[in-house]
Structure formats: C-alpha cells, structure tokens
Amino acid sequence: MNKKELFRVGLGISISIAALAVVFYYIDPGQAILALKEVDYWYLVPLVLLSLSSISVRSLAWRMILPKKLPFWKVFLTVNAGYFLNTVLPFRMGEIGRSFLLKPSGLDFWQVFPTILLERAFDLLIAVGLFMGALPFILQLPQGSFLVFLIAVLVLAALAVFYLMVRYQTQLTHWIETRNTPWPKAQARVHESLERAMSGLGVLADGRRFALAFAWMALSWSLALGFQYLLLLAFIPQAKILWAVFALGVAALGVAVPSSPGNLGIYEASFVAALTIFDIPSSMALAYALLSHTINLSITSFIGAYALFREGIAFKSLFEYRRRTSEESEL
C-alpha cells in the first residue's frame, strides 16, 4: 500500500474505533445484552425473508443497469460477494470483486464500475429523501407535507439530471473537452474521469430502462425499510414507522463516512443517534442496531462467501486485479 492508501485505511479504522468508543462510553453493554434477551426471536424468520427480498430486488436493479443482460442468479451472487468483500477487506474491494466476478461474462472493469457508481448515486438520493422527508415531522415544522413534496421534487430533479447526463454523454464530454479554462490539466482529468464513468451507462440512455432501474432500487429500499420497522416492533410494539424511516436515512448517510470494513461502529452509532431522538433508551437502541447489523452481515457474508468459493476466487487474485485496474486508470 502507498501512503495515500495507508492514510485512507487508518482514517476509516480510526473513525470506527472512535464511534465504538463513544457508544460504549455512554451505554452500558450489559443493558444492551438484557434488551437482546427480551426480544421475540420469532421475528427472525420474516426479517431474514425481508432482507433477502431487498437484496434480490437490488440485484434486479443492478441487472437492469448492467450493459449486458446476465442471469439473475449470477447477478445476485455477485452482489452478495461484493457485500461480503466490503465486510472483510478495505479499498472498496466489493466493487473490485463485482467487476472481477463479471469478467468471465464478458464485462471489463470500466463497463461494471460506472454501473456501481450509478447504484450508489441512487442510494444516496433515496437516503437523503428518507432523512429530509422525516425531518419536518420530527421537528414538527408547519407545512411538513409541503416540505416532503418539495424534497420529492428535488429528488426527481436530480434523477432527471442523471438521466440527461447519460442520455447526452457524448455531447457533455465534448463540451467539457472544448472549453477554454486556465486549468487545462484539471480539465483533461475531469474529461477523462467523466468519459470513463459514463462508459458503462450507455444502456440507460433509454428512459424506460432508467426508470425501471430506479423503480427496482426504490422497491429494494422499501423492503429494507420494512425490515427495520419490523425489527423495531420486536423491541417496541408501539413503534411508529416514522422512527424507522428516519433511522434508516441517518444510518445510510452515516455509513457513507469512511470507516473500517463492514462499517463497524459507524452503523451502530448512526442508529443509536437516530433512535434516541424518539426517547428510546440508548441501550435498547444499541441492541437494535447490533441485531440489525448482525442479521444483514450474516446473510450477505454467507451467500457472498459461497459465491467466491463457487467461482474459486482467492483474495490474492482480487488484490492483483485491483492493482492492475489502478495502474490502468492512471495511464
């Protein structure tokens, strides 16, 4: 690893350790364990089904974005392998792993990676929508419904911008290339990065396909929201869905911060911070976050590990592939 990579890994691990330290400084782990013992674990069956359904629908969304139609099972296993690699390895190895696993299907890195960027952009839009949509009701702002409508309009406007960038990518890259700026090197870098980022998104120039990809993604998030709300009911039978909406939005934005593999610490701290706003005891919020994280990681890790074993992929091969793609991107 070079100095930049070492710094990124060190920063992520430091943030995770700091988050865990804050959580366990203010919360008695013993109380969280007691809260876990009181949960009705019959909820686990529907929770696992909801989690699997959310991942399956997300796989359908990514399958729609990919420039080549692949079997659903292949895409589903690849998505889970990506999650598993992000759980155990640094450097966004899940994204590298996805690209690596799709090479035998005839897709190279720069055809796959931009599709993952678009998937992440969809995630960010939905997460911001959940957070901002719940906030007016939490703060009891007047005209809260109007503010939610305004946020929805802004999200749709951002989606329209994404679509137009994909639809007119040739014109956009040409416009950037022909501008006269005092920073020609920076301009060339932006042009090259945009061209590569757009290289795998040409299939979404079709408005119907773009809309379907986002619709599948939105459905995946709806199932994830159902998972969080049902789990919250297992702890607090009188819980409101607004609590789950806000907590999921905060957690989704929280895990975007650099952290250790698996978002350890950041995930728990985000849910605790969000749920304590509703006067939920911090120990119960921590128990909820730990159980949520454990269920999701267990599912993706089990399926993802199977996917890598099935393909005979070694971690060494993934790091070698990452090194080659990094060198190619610097050329």
Image (tube, rainbow, N blue to C red):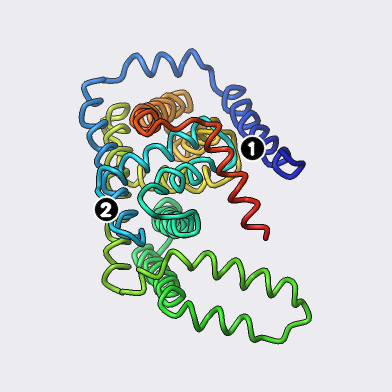
State which quarter of the image contains the C terminus. Answer: bottom right
| Residue at image mark 2 | 219
The amino acid type of the residue labelled 2 equals Leu
**Residue 250, position as x, y percentages in the image:** 47, 46
Query: Where 169 falls versus 2 (above or below)?
Result: below
Task: Give me the residue at 53% from left, 35% from top.
Answer: 317
SS class of the residue under badge 2? helix
Say whether residue 212 is visible: yes
State which quarter of the image contains the N terminus. Answer: top right
Q: Quadrant of residue 178?
A: bottom right
Could you tell whether 274 is left or right of 11 in the image? Answer: left
**Residue 72, position as x, y percentages in the image:** 25, 47
**Residue 171, position as x, y percentages in the image:** 50, 84
Ranked by sequence position, the earlier of labels 1 and 2 is 1
The amino acid type of the residue labelled 1 equals Gly
Could you tell whether 136 is left or right of 9 in the image? Answer: left
Could you tell whether 317 is left or right of 79 in the image? Answer: right
Task: Give me the residue at 47% from left, 23% from top.
Answer: 283
Foreground: 202 or 284? 202
Say which mark, if any, is on residue 12.
Answer: 1
Foreground: 212 or 293? 212
